[in-house]
Image: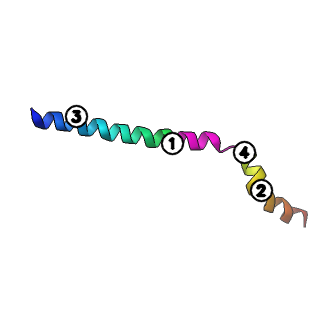
Amino acid sequence: MDDAAYLVVSLAGLFALIGVVIAGVARLVQRDTTEYDRRFLWQDYEKEKEE
């Protein structure tokens, strides 16, 4: 019976950790917009294109 309780607690902790990681990745993807890319990453591309 004790082994089953440890298994349940361990699995709950593992799923909680995976959930936190997935939420962090989703937040990162949501904040990464095309406008940010245009503003900060594509500046060099536009300069090279003009030359």
**Residue 42 disc label:** 2
**Residue 24 disc label:** 1
Q: Which quarter of the picture shows residue 19?
A: top left
Task: Name the residue type under label 3.
Answer: Val
- CB of mark 3 within 8 Å of CB of mark 4? no
Tally of marks: 4
Q: Residue furthest right?
A: 51
Q: What stretch is highlighted in magenta?
A: 24-34
State how far apart marks 2 and 4 are (Cα): 10 Å
State the residue position of label 4: 34
Q: Which quarter of the picture shows residue 29?
A: top right
State the residue position of label 3: 8
Marked residue nearer the N-terminal end (2 or 3)? 3
Marked residue nearer the N-terminal end (2 or 4)? 4
On-image quarter of the C terminus:
bottom right
Image location of residue 31, percent across then percent down:
64, 41
Tell me the mark number nearer the camera, choosing from 4 and 1. 1
Secondary structure found at label 4 = helix
Q: Residue drawn at (90%, 63%), measured in percent from left and top? A: 50
Taking 3 as reference, is 37 left or right? right
Tell me the mark number nearer the camera, choosing from 3 and 4. 3
State how far apart marks 2 and 3 are (Cα): 49 Å
Q: Crowding at label 4, few (<14), some or many (≥20) Cα neighbours within 10 Å?
A: few
Marked residue nearer the N-terminal end (3 or 4)? 3
Magenta residue check for 43: no
Taking 5 as reference, is 20 left or right? right
What type of secondary structure mainly makes up the magenta span? helix
Task: Name the residue type under label 1.
Answer: Gly
